Image (spheres, rainbow, N blue to C red):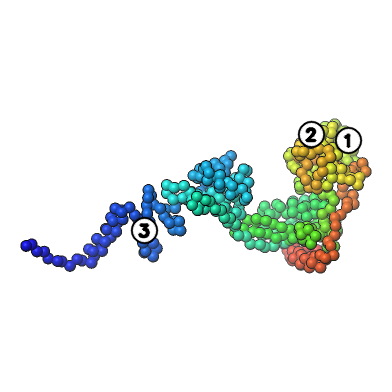
Amino acid sequence: MSSFSLRRVSPDWLAALCRVLAVLVPMALGVSIVMGATGRSTVMGTTGGSAAEPEARVGDHSRALSLRSGESVPELLARGGISGRDARRLLDLIRPYADWTIPDPALEARFHRRAGEPPERIELRIDRDRTLDFRLHGAMWAVSVDSVAVSVDTAVVTGLIETSVWAARLGGDADRLSVAEKGDLAGQLAGVYAWQIDFYRDPRPGDAFRLAIERAVRPDGSVREATVLAAEYTRRGELFQAYRFRSSEDGAPSFYDENGTALRGAFLRAPLDLVRVTSRFGPARYHPLLGTTRRHRGIDYGAASGTPVHATGDGSIARAGWAGDFGLMIEIDHGRGIRTRYAHLSGIADGLGPGRGVRQGEVIGTVGSTGLSTAPHLHYEFLLAGRQVDPASVDLPVAHMLPDADTLRFGEARGAARALLGHALWPGGLPVW
């Protein structure tokens, strides 16, 4: 009868044996052991590859793709591994948030997937402010919107015009604005006073302005939105005031003067967004093509071909088509004996013809150089009782005043705006006025 002796096993040797078994046994059984941060083990099945729990994101593979030149959103999704029915479902979910038929060139997508499987989550950045987060739940996709948080502040900027409104000497909070924001100031000013001042012709050296602007600023310092709260413009001793206010009648924000009269009038002072003027209204002008001096009863606005032209007032089309020396021309009848003409156009808006109604600010055509013209520009005429007049000399009808019910509330808003503007000082600490 054989015998054997029982020897004491070393603790170190036993620990080493356990570590070997911990590796070999799971391999034989087809499972993997993942050590968590706390040292606890989580066992997960591996059918054809590692299948991590979604919460843990174990085995997650992500890939970021940017939209290529000329590429469509469906093509971008296909590159990320989404096609067929899933692609159609995603496009249906995108539609309420973005026009995917004409995607933003900056559109980006990040596709999340487990190894060897199709994407289960997609982050689609549709613009600088919004990312659509798509997650697959079973066979269905769900979407949520992640918006970039912004902070709101107010900047009060002053400007002294020395040569032009574009090159105004800035003060106040101007040092807080980016180069792009400073470039937008002229357009913002023109938007407020579009019915009182023609910024192509009216500004003179010595004119001054100040603007109170509410800004929505992204974390990277860029501005999502800028809204003018109040403005003041002084022109040859005349002060124009503007205060943003919501009337109880329609609830829409608009600008009103110090007396509560709406700045929005029957006619815009200019038919183009702020550019430059090549020829002013006057009795005569030398015509370079004809080599003669001719009467010039209009205003020529120099602008690039294709620049949108806006109707300066409500009315109906009296004429739209070729008009001899004027080339392509549109004439609008505004009633009360007032008509406006827009000549040398490169194109006329689709569907625009005699009898069709137009609204103030509506795009009716594009700048061109048709007819007797040496370069792209818009020839604009303002006719009163059939006679061309300088629109700046016409006492145009003004819009309504605020209702009595808004008087107290407007007075409070006006007082707050004046206090805000009053903090603006010229460089050097001198008050604006």
Of callouts 1 and 3, the N-terminal one: 3
In the picture shown, does residue 165 fall above or below 290? below
* x then y, percent, for residue 247: 79, 61
Q: Secondary structure at mark 2?
A: loop
Residue 280 in view (yes/no): no
**For this rendering, which residue is in front, 295 or 343?**
343
Residue at 62% across / 43% down in the picture? 102
Q: Of the residues tagged 1 and 2, which is closer to the observer?
A: 2
Q: Secondary structure at mark 1?
A: strand
Residue at 60% across / 57% down in the picture? 147
* x then y, percent, for residue 64: 51, 48
Which residue is disc 3 drawn over?
A: 43
Q: Give the CA separation, mark 1 to mark 3.
A: 94 Å
Left or right of residue 332: residue 177: left
Q: Would you identify the image quadrant in which residue 26 lies? A: bottom left
* x then y, percent, for residue 58: 42, 55
Which residue is disc 1 drawn over?
A: 293
Tell me the kind of residue under disc 2. Thr
Q: Give the CA separation, mark 3 to mark 2.
A: 78 Å
Q: Secondary structure at mark 3?
A: strand
Q: Of the residues tagged 3 and 2, which is closer to the observer?
A: 3
Of callouts 1 and 2, the N-terminal one: 1
**For this rendering, which residue is in front, 258 or 265?**
265
Instruction: Locate the C terminus and report the quarter of the image it occupies.
Output: bottom right
Q: Of the residues tagged 1 and 3, which is closer to the observer?
A: 3
Which residue is disc 2 drawn over?
A: 370
* x then y, percent, for residue 134: 54, 52
Residue 291 in view (yes/no): yes
Q: Mark 2 packing: few (<14 Cα in 10 Å), some, or many (20+)?
A: many
In the picture shown, does residue 138 fall above or below 370? below
Tell me the kind of residue under disc 1. Thr
Residue at 42% across / 49% down in the picture? 115
